[in-house]
Amino acid sequence: MALIALAADKGSPGVTTAAVALAAVWPRRALLAETDPAGGDLVYRSAAAHGGPLNPNTGMLSIAATARRGLVPDQLWDHVQPLSGGLEVLVGLGNAEQAAGLAGLWPTLGRAFAHLADSPNAPADVIADCGRVAGDTPAVEMFSQAALVLLISRTEPEAIARVRDRAAALTARLHGGSRGAASLATPLIGVILIADPGDSAKLVHQVNDMLVAAQTGARVVGTLADDPSGADQLAGRRRGRLDKSLLIRSARKVTADLYQQFGAAWAVPAGGSGGQPTAGAGR
């Protein structure tokens, strides 16, 4: 199974940009799911494959009724829409008030996402954009089903301090307490830094030292380029060679590194085109 949940703490935006970038270059078929209880962005910023707008009523909103009767992973595809460029997405809620309709269903969704890779008909890995999380964020109820929980962080001191504390809190919730670097557990809690490529190596070392010292059980698994131009191209707000952008090039390295480390555990081959950058959205 392969559910990859992306989230951030307060003050560290960039989750949607990271999720779209990683899903666009994922080595296997990927489904991008907007699972932020506060609402999604793609319906406002991205065109559907037919050239018109995405349908805001088909996605997390429509799946709620299905999930209340039980949810088979393949049923997810009934609520998916392709973006212009081919990336398949489960459009998020329109606003935070609609999250009440998913109350109690987050574990069910997590199991369906996690086991979509085992589908005999249309297997895929799920990249879940969970937005900003806190202790009472309902999307956290999916995390126990994830293969990886990736916290997105910028590199200002306050952002690093927050990601350290969020990683420690998630480790306590998911694994029952603090853990050192030698006792990593599943789901692995990783950190992806949004950084200037020239500074990334030094920052990774410094942040890893801090995560280990705090016994968070987390570690840095990669860096995405702080590339506003690339983010605008990904969101469809700017023209250019998206595949040549620093953002997409760094996303390819992150996905390659993740698959080198963890791909053997995601053994079910998934079909689909995958691997092609597509216009999405930035947050």
Image: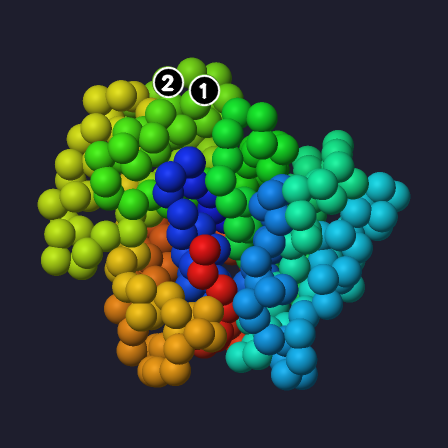
Residue 221 appears in the rendering: no
Residue furthest to the top in view is 177
Q: Position of residue 199 (x, y in %)?
A: 13, 52
Q: Position of residue 7 (x, y in %)?
A: 47, 43
Residue type, mark 2 in image: Ser
Residue type, mark 1 in image: Ala
Residue beneath the point at 28% across and 64% down? 227
Determine crowd level at label 2: few under 14, some 14-19, many 20+ residues with C-alpha closer than 10 A: some
The image's colour scheme reads rainbow
The circle on residue 172 is 1
Residue that carries the numbered disc 2 in the rendered image: 178
Decide if residue 79 is on the left or right side of residue 19: right
Decide if residue 98 is on the left or right side of residue 85: right
Decide if residue 213 is on the left or right side of residue 29: left
Q: Is mark 2 on a helix, strand or loop?
A: loop
Residue beneath the point at 79% across and 55% down? 62
Question: What's the CA distance linking mark 1 and mark 2?
Answer: 6 Å
Whether label 1 touches label 2, CB < 8 Å: yes
Residue beneath the point at 37% across and 59% down? 255
